[in-house]
Structure formats: structure tokens, C-alpha cells
Image: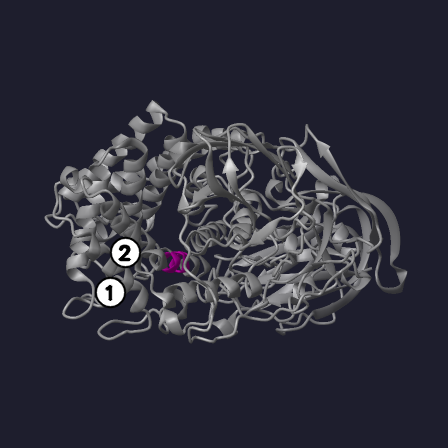
Amino acid sequence: MNYLPFYRSLSLAFAFATAGAIALPHAIAKPALAPTTTVKLHPLTPVPIQKVTINDAFWSPKLTLWQATTINDTFSKFEGSGAFENFDRVAAKQTGGHKGDPWWDGLVYETITGASDFLASHPDPTLQRRIEGYVTRIAAAAAADPDGYVNTGATLNNIGVRWSNPPKPGDDHNDNFPHTIYNAGCLVEAGIHYYRATGQTQLLQVGTRMANYMCGIMGPAPKQNIIPGHAISEQAFVTLYRLYHEQPALKAKIGLPIDENAYLKLAEFWIENRGHTEGRKGEGVYNQDDKSVFEQPTLEGHAVRSALLASGVATAAVVNKRPEYLETGKRWWDNMVEGKMYVTGGLGAIPSSEGFGPDYELPHEGYAETCAAVAGGFFSQNMNLATGDARYVDVLEKELYNGALSGVGQSGDRYFYTNYLRSGPDRRRWSWLPEAGTPCCPPMFLKLQGGLPGYIYATDASAIYVNLYISSKAQINAGKAQVELSQTSNYPWDGTVKMEVNPQTAAQFALNLRIPAWAQGASVELNGKPVKTLKVANNYAQLDRTWKKGDTITLHLPMPIERVKSDPRVAADVGRVALMRGPLVYCLEGIDNGGSVDSLLLPTTAPIIAEHRYGLLGGVTVLKGTAQRLRGEGAATEATPIEFTAIPFYANTNREPTEMAVWIADDKAKVLPITLSREATPSASHCFAGDSVSALNDGQTPQKSDDESIQRMTWWDHRGTQEWAQLTFKTPRTLSGTDIYWWDERRVNRQCRVPQSWKLQYLDGDQWKDVSNPSGYGTEIDTFNHVDFTPVTTTALRVVAQLQTEWSGGILEWRLKG
């Protein structure tokens, strides 16, 4: 099949396999904002969740776990943290005492949305009763306001200011911090999904009343110029329009005046008025508000907000059929996959903004928030539904099997906020606050995975589209034909997919099968015979014929092991290789590979094989081969063969804390050999939860003292205190010098600085003693600060730092001299 993928690894952009490597031409999406793109509107309709039954060896156990454990865990933890108490206090017309962040209302609603989709697939009376109890409390809070306004953070703690950024007097129309419009969008979304799952309208009525209130306030003059600080409402309000447009009889059940066109117009206003800051405070690049979306060449700012805005633009394009909407969606999506996406599907490389950096800036310790992967999946799915092009589903699949799937552990109640492509041996999944910072990722994860049955199949007037290869059975209307379509496979471990087509009566329609970009040489059999001439359009293999009961299709998707090389503009990936097989990205963990993965060299000619292990991590196919472990420094470095094992990325950090890496050195210059300092176990008096003690001696070389591309150890949020960091050996070592690279944020005006003073101590028996004759304790930034001292034989060396008054501090790298 002559189907050359326009992207490969997405880490970035057009990566290529080294075996018979083909370097594909690629470039950043050009800011050509005139309608020069060839994208065309070709709407697809997803087959509803209730019409699809999943019976899949890979997905069914996970869906069962998430419905039984993750949903209840998330609801229970919000209950325990006071999120639902906020609604009770508003209903009682109390003030003050809001629990959690202002956006927790939205997180509760998002959990209801995800849980509703699970209910649509697998009815559960106990779960439904639980949600109904929450809906009653939410409705009571909304009923306490004459306008139907419900936003507990503003009502309890920011009385009289409904849309702005507290504690500023008046209303400056800045929704960045209070997230009022975000919360409202999540409410509307939850009402729609709960209605579709159960037929219950109470929550939909609450959301519709809030939407009516907002439509009366926001919009073109003389209404107020207010846009969302955090996108999601754009898509939610378009979906609300579509619900009432497609089900006009529902309006009578809601019992409110409903003009569905107003919801669409407000969504368009929120999209089109970005960059137009008349009468309000602009929210800048971070919130996609520095220029018109139609003039914005790339996705910028906060990754989750940006991708959710893009998803809203794609959704609106299907309804309003305005070409500039679809052109903007395509332009942003091309830039996302060509310039801003990790090989895993991760989005948002910059920790300080949870956002996008310049194109091709993708450090291995970049943020890659779970919510951003989810948002990227939604955006990609909506672009597929708008265009009928399967390439968008390739990225949805990448998120489902990699970038988003890693966000929840195999117990169903341990989570990742960030999904690094490299992590140290102290990396752990978190349970809840305060480890999480904010618990936004479990609700978003549940929304994505709850909707899984609805992503598998889609239709247009004359065709059925098979987008995902998940064992399932669906009842589908293809034009006038009613069709039962089933598929079985051992995907993602095996690429053979068998389907059976059963129309009620013989009928002509096209059956379009997505051919993934990674599946070079795919083939199809129809009723046991090879299809010799296969028509491929929009990356679908099209089988257009008269179908009869019992017709069968066998799709063969080759799954060779791929050595993926990234675009050379991704500096972090140069001299490294990633491993993929089928839709899965792989990683190496220290627990399987002798402790250290950064010290491994994977020769370009080393054979690699796949082996399925039923008892490992719920049953996974691993990749095996022979690598070399490097030990020593400089010319004294030695290489030792080692058998390596790679596991799917989604399964990382499910056993014990251990090193992990996706990109493995295939260039000796990129290996981090095991050295004297790397043999030690690091510890510290304190380390911020978002940083890592293992960064002290992970072998990384900083580029500057505020280098966010690698991990650091910080004492934040301790200020002005005496702190320590320590390297401990199992057996005594003789040491005579050290190099310290300080973490300092003065240039970016944040909270860490070099220490006021510091010294070195060594452990002598059970006492700490100062080293003798230190050559000087430097505090220079952007360089290693070297200290020589009289040699000591010890099992531990300690940095004792006195932090500057009102400032914290930290260390990027610590090296020892024997």
C-alpha cells in the first residue's frame, strides 16, 4: 500500500524508522492565514455509545476497573475535600469557607460527564443513585440564585463579582483565575451527557438556565465583552445548540425559554473575540487571547486551554460551515503534531506555564500533562468528525494508548499529573492532594475513556467508518440500511482484525477501514480472498459493495518493531532512539534493566524481538535485545553487554519507583555512564513535590541555572532556612572534590536563588564534620561551582546550605571527585 505517513513519531513531527530510514521532508506549519488550505468539510456522525458493546481483551478489564474504582475514588476524594459541601453552603445562602480551588466545580462536573458515559455503556444503579444525589445538591445551589448562577467559589468568597479575577474591585471581565465560564461549560457538558445516559433532565435544566443567563450578559455590544479564561465552554455550548436543534421536543421537558441559536452565537463570540480586548483586560498568549484565532498561526500558551479551544473551533466548524473555522483547526493541528507533540502524544513541554514552548522544544522532563493529552485526543477526534480524514484518528489513538493512558495507574486509584519521557528513581504516582497540586487529571481521563465506545465507528450518508480496532459489536444505520458490525482482534499486540458485516437485508454502502500511518504494507481479505486493488482515500481503505449477511473482512496491519528517530530540531532527542510497535510507544525501566537506563547504549544494529508476557503488568508484549552499559568517566569508560527489556509506556511506574526513559542513546556521546556520583543514593532535608531528589546526581548537564529542560532538586517552599542535600554510598569512598550547579530563578522572577552561604560535611562514624581546606564555596550561576578539599574516606557527603532570607533554593546537578 502506497501510504507514506506525513508524520511518524510525533516527537516531533516527521520522525522515521532507522531500518531503511527515510527522512521525510517536514516543516513548521506556515502562518499562511489566507484560505489556501485544501481541507474540506466532510462531517461524520459518531455511532452513539449505547449502540456499541465493547468486548475486548485489552480495553474491557480497564473499563471495568475505571468504572468500579476510578470513578468512585474521584467522587469520594472530592467529597472528602469539601467540593460538594461548597454547593450545600451556597444552597443555604452562607458565605465564606470555600473548599478547594475555584475550578473544583468544573472538575466535579467533568467527573459526572465521564461517569455518565460509563453508565451509558454499562448501567449501574448504585453509581446512578450516587450521581443523582450530587445533582440534587448542585440544583439546590443553582436554585438559591434568582438568575440560576452557580459558581461556588465566587458566590462564597468573592461576593458581588461573578466573572472577574479576585480580589480586584469591580468587574474587569478577566476570567483567568475564577474559571467561572469554564465551570459553566463543564456544567452544561455534564447535563448533556447525564441526560443522554439516563434520560434525566434536572442537571441539563441547571446547565441550560446558567447558559441562558450568560447569553443575556456576554456577546457583542451592548452586551459585555467577556471570554473564557480556560477554554471548554466553546465546545459545550455548540453541543448544547446541537442537542436542542436535533431534539426540539426536549425543550418542553426543560421548562425554560430556549433559543438554541443563542448558544451557538455565544460560542462563536468566545472564539472570534479572542484578541479583541475592548472594555476588558486581555489575557494574553497564555489564554490564547493575544490575537484573533484566525490570525494565530500556531497553538500557543497553556496546553490544555489551547487544545480545548481548538477542539471547540473544530466542533463549531461542522455546525456553522464557515471555512475559516476549519482552516484554523487544520493549521493548529498540523502545528501541534509537527512542532509541539511528544512521541507519546504528550503536549505542553514547559512546566512554569503548563504550556507550549517554541516549536521543537521538547525536553524529556517536559510537562506533558495528562489533561493536555486528553484535550489533544478530543481535538483530533473532532477534526476527524469534521473532515472524514483518518490521519486525525491516528493521533486520537496515540493518546488513547500512550499519552493519556499513562495518566492512571493499573490500580485505578493512582495518578500522574505529568507524563515525563524520562524520570528518576524516586518517581511515584500520586493519590490525591497535596501531591497532585490540583486533581484535574482524573476527571479529564474519565471523560476521554468513558467516551471510548463512541470513537470506534462513524457514518456519513453512504458509508460506515471503522476508526479504532477494538473488539466490539455495533448497531449502525448506514443510509437506509441497518447493519450489525462486529470485530475481533488481539490489538494492540497483534494487527490481525476480523470483522463480520450483517445488514438486515442486502445493502450497498462503503465500509471504510482506517489504515494507521505506522501500518506500512497493510492488506485486506474479503470473504477469505485478498483484495488485490484496494482504494485508499483520506487514509481509509474503502470497500464499496453490496453487503450480505455473514460477509467477512480480515484486515492485516503489520506491526514491525520500529526504531524511531525524531526530527533533528528536537535537541533532546539527537543521538537517541525510541521504540514503537503498532500504536504503542515503549520505555525502559530500571527495575527490568539493572537499575540505570540512562547508562545504556542501544547499538543501531542490535536485533530486537517482541515477546508477550501474560503475567507482567496485566499482560503486555515487551521488546527485548542486547544493549551496552557504560561505566566510568572519560577515557576510562567501559562497556558491558546487558539484556534489556522495554515495556509499553502506558504501563510505566506501576511496580516500584525506578528510572524510566523513552529515548535511549544510540550515540555513545549521549550516554550518561555510571560514575562515582551516580553510584550514590541522593537525599535531602526537603524537596518540593513537583521536583526530584534524584535530580541531584542524575548525570544531566544543565545549560543554565534556570534550565527547565531537566529535573532539579529544590527546597521550595522553605525560605531563609538551613537545608541540606546528601549523597550516600553503600561502602566507604575516598572523595577530594565536588562540583555544584545551583538552581536560580532570578531571571524569570520566581522564588529560588543561590544560597547565602554553604559548606560541605562528611560522615565520620555517626558524626558530621566539615571538610578541611575547602578551596572556596562558590555561588555563581550558569556554571558548576568547584570545590577541592583534603581527601576524606566516608559513606556520605552533605551540602549544608543557608538559604537567602525570603528565598528558597535548589541544585540542578552535583558531581563528585575521587
Q: Which residue is mark 2?
A: 181
- For this rendering, which residue is in front, 84 or 691? 84
Left or right? Give the position of 358 relative to 254: right
- For this rendering, which residue is in front, 101 or 661? 661
Label 1, residues with CA under 10 Å away: few <14, some 14-19, many ≥20: many
Q: Name which residue type carries label 1.
A: Ile
Q: Is residue 33 magenta?
A: no
Residue positioned 83% across, 47% down in the render: 607
- Extent of the magenta region: 308-314
Q: Name which residue type carries label 2.
A: Ile
Indicate which disc residue 226 carries.
Answer: 1
326 is higher (above) or lower (below) than 461: below
Residue 233 is situated, as x and y percent measured from the top left of the image, at 31, 54
Residue 787 is situated, as x and y percent measured from the top left of the image, at 73, 68
Indicate which disc residue 392 carries.
Answer: none
Can residue 299 be seen at all in this image of the molecule? no
Left or right? Give the position of 730 relative to 299: right
611 is higher (above) or lower (below) than 236: above
